[in-house]
Image (cartoon, rainbow, N blue to C red):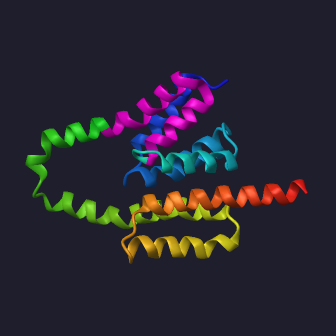
Amino acid sequence: MTGLFELFGSFLKIGAFTFGGGYAMIPLIEREVIDRRRWIERQEFLDLLTIAQSAPGPISLNTSVFVGYKLRGYAGAIASILGVVLPSFTIILAVALFFAGIRDNAAVDAAFKGMRPAVVALIIGPVISLARGMHRALYPVIAASALAIWHLGWSPVYILFAAALAGIGWELVTLKRRTK
């Protein structure tokens, strides 16, 4: 059984070494809980990630809560969320205390500009990983959803709701075919 300190330590490491927000954490969480620790199977992680993305709040926090809960119940959820939040909280607190002094520092500005391409790459990683688990026939749905959100200004909530209804409908149709 996975220990609470082990769970906390793993998510502390993820939280401490991730720049770029929630989506940038997903590849690290995936590598830690699937490849390194073998706590969760890949398909189950993708399901947890889908739920985490649908729930309100940052995806990295939701994912850590779901993984922690899956492994150790409420105590695991608390241990994992504390681990993933503590580094960011500490860094944000330090930045808030000292930001006035470094706000106009050219080196700090240059460092943040240099990190942007890496953050974009870290965000693209989970997108590719999620796409691997899908049937190729769904790629046009991805493109249509992205276009509807970016170019038509549709709310992602409506897209997710429609996709959930379509998924339920598809399962009901295929279930009906299998039972015949």
Residue 144, percent from left and from top = 52, 75
Residue 69, percent from left and from top = 56, 30
Q: Nearer the viewer, residue 33 or 137?
A: 137
Quarter of the image holding residue 38?
Answer: top right
Q: Residue at x 38, y 51 (%)?
A: 21
Relative to residue 43, is residue 142 depicted above or below? below
Q: Residue at x 59, y 23 (%)?
A: 3
Reply yes or no: does residue 136 show up in magenta.
Answer: no
Q: Which residues are magenta?
A: 59-88
Q: Nearer the viewer, residue 108 or 14?
A: 14
Q: Residue placed farthest to the right in the image?
A: 180
Reply yes or no: does residue 71 show up in magenta.
Answer: yes
Image quarter hosting the C terminus:
bottom right
Relative to residue 132, is residue 17 depicted above or below? above
In the image, is 12 to the left or to the right of 110?
A: right
Residue 162, percent from left and from top = 54, 62
Main SS category, magenta section: helix
In the image, is 108 to the left or to the right of 85?
A: left
